[in-house]
């Protein structure tokens, strides 16, 4: 009787060891890493009054490195995701807004981050500087320099039309 208990205990321990050693092949983490850009703008109406707005109307943006990939071309957009290049310190975007094209530059430091064996690595970024070539843009403000896999505002364009 005692011998049967020992066999059962060893069998359970062996089965537990087999289950504990199986590799996890499912990635349970969101791996998309992008900076969110928002707008804070003002323009003058027909009476000369200042009108403030925070949504993009008919905007398109694309990375210069890949001119076929349009990130947005919609109306009433509150935030635009910017996917920074993982293998360089400077990513440039062509931004077309109100039929005027601007070049937006984002200087950043990429950092490879190991997530897990199932997920692999993600490239996080630290934004060091951002600027625009459009004279309508007063400034490009860095709100949150750390770009990771959580969606949060990173850049804000201050525009005056």
Image (tube, rainbow, N blue to C red):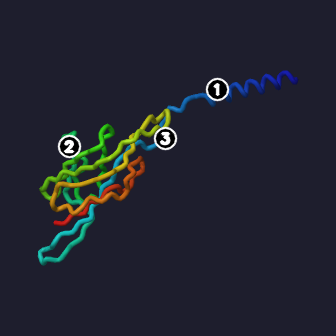
Location of mark 3 (residue): 28
Location of mark 2 (residue): 64
Distance between mark 1 and mark 2 Cα atoms: 51 Å
69 or 113: nearer the viewer: 113
Q: Residues within 10 Å of mark 1 (few under 14, many from 20)?
A: few
Comparing marks 3 and 2, which lies closer to the viewer?
2
- Above/below status of 107 relative to 142: above
Instruction: Give the quadrant of residue 160.
Output: bottom left
Residue at 22% from the left image edge and 58% from the top image edge:
75
Could you say where residue 119 lies in the image, as x and y percent from the top left?
A: 46, 36
- Could you tell me how many numbered marks the image carries? 3
Q: Quadrant of the C terminus?
A: bottom left
In terms of secondary structure, where does tag 1 sit?
A: helix
Dots 1, 2 in contact, CB < 8 A: no
In terms of secondary structure, where does tag 2 sit?
A: loop
Instruction: Give the quadrant of residue 142.
Output: bottom left
Residue 30 located left or right of residue 61: right
- Above/below status of 120 relative to 14: below
Location of mark 1 (residue): 18
Q: Residues within 10 Å of mark 3 (few under 14, many from 20)?
A: few
Q: Quadrant of the N terminus?
A: top right
> Which mark sits nearer the N-terminus, 3 or 2?
3
104 or 57: nearer the viewer: 104
Could you say where residue 122 lies in the image, as x and y percent from the top left?
A: 41, 39
Could you say where residue 21 lies in the image, as x and y percent from the top left?
A: 61, 28
Dots 3, 2 in contact, CB < 8 A: no
Residue at 37% from the left image edge and 53% from the top image edge:
145
- Residue 144 visible (yes or no): yes
């Amino acid at each position: 009787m005692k011998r049967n208990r020992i066999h059962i205990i060893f069998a359970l321990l062996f089965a537990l060891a087999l289950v504990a050693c199986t590799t996890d092949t499912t990635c349970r983490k969101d791996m998309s890493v992008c900076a969110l850009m928002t707008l804070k703008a003002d323009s003058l109406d027909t009476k000369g009054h200042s009108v403030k707005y925070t949504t993009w109307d008919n905007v398109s943006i694309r990375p210069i490195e890949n001119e076929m990939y349009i990130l947005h071309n919609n109306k009433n957009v509150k935030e635009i995701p910017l996917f920074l290049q993982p293998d360089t310190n400077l990513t440039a975007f062509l931004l077309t807004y109100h039929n005027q094209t601007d070049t937006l530059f984002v200087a950043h430091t990429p950092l490879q981050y190991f997530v897990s064996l199932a997920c692999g690595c993600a490239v996080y970024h630290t934004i060091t500087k951002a600027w625009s070539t459009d004279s309508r843009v007063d400034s490009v403000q860095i709100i949150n320099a750390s770009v990771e896999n959580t969606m949060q505002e990173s850049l804000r364009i201050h525009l005056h039309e």
